Amino acid sequence: MRYLTFALTKGRLADKTLAMLEKIGITCEEMKDKDSRKLIFVNEELKLRFFLAKGPDVPTYVEYGAADIGIVGKDTILEEGRKLYEVMNLGFGACRMCVCGPESAKEVLASNQLIRVATKYPNIAKDYFYNKKHQTVEIIKLNGSIELAPIVGLSEVIVDIVETGSTLRENGLKVLEEVCPLSARMVVNQVSMKMENERISRLIEDLRKVI
Ligand code: PRP
């Protein structure tokens, strides 16, 4: 039996993924050691391998087959647009992709003026404004702390993730429009889905029972 390889998203999602896998008897003790600098972890008994990667890289590993399975946020799947199968909504990591800004931006957003939109997710923002709203906007790519952009005058609005809403509240911003709901998903390499169908299908079935 060959190894099935999982690419997990580093950080909050990885902790929740490991807790979920434990519920179906898949453990990887080595991975819980936060001080370890090891990059890849093996469960010899079950012939499974796990590695942690930055969110946007997870779909890349899965598309190329370096990982058979990935656990990654829907935001990243939409943004990266890789060729893979999205097989399951895992439910955790639930949040929303929204257009946000100060209350005063509501008017300018509705007026069809050429506004600037700051975001870490240019493809999602483009799809929303160009294809769904048929509105021409200027998209400015940022890499974090997106809420700063309308505060310092870089853009009128942002497209960003809202979870609890506290970052918006603490910075005097509001949700102006909702783009889509998000949560963690399981993705599978298209060839692996055929070659390892039995093992992957069993895994999906087991996970369905605990979700
Ligand atoms: C995300 C997101 C928001 C915040 C939303 O940022 O970009 O800033 O969380 O969460 P809330 O609604 O619960 O306040 P993250 O912490 O991932 O860091 P980043 O700003 O570097 O993207």
Image: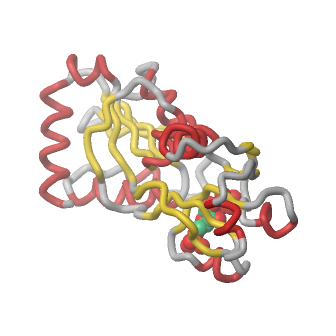
Look at the picture and state if 52 lies above or below 29. Answer: above
- Can residue 38 be seen here? The reply is no
* 52 on left or right of 101: left
In percent of width and height, residue 80 lies at: 53, 34
- Can residue 11 be seen here? The reply is yes
* 75 on left or right of 192: right
Residue 46's quadrant in the figure? Answer: top left
Give the position of the C terminus as an image quadrant: bottom left
In percent of width and height, residue 52 lies at: 52, 43
Name the quarter showing ligand 1.
bottom right
In percent of width and height, residue 4 lies at: 31, 29
* 52 on left or right of 111: left
Q: Residue furthest front?
A: 111
Give the position of the N terminus as an image quadrant: top left
Look at the picture and state if 30 lies above or below 201. Answer: below
In percent of width and height, residue 181 lies at: 40, 58
> How many numbered discs sit on the rendered protein?
0
Residue depicted at x 51% and y 57%: 97
Between 105 and 31, the one lying in front of the other is: 105
Between 97 and 131, the one lying in front of the other is: 131
Look at the picture and state if 128 lies above or below 20. Answer: above
Between 109 and 125, the one lying in front of the other is: 109
Residue depicted at x 53% and y 39%: 127
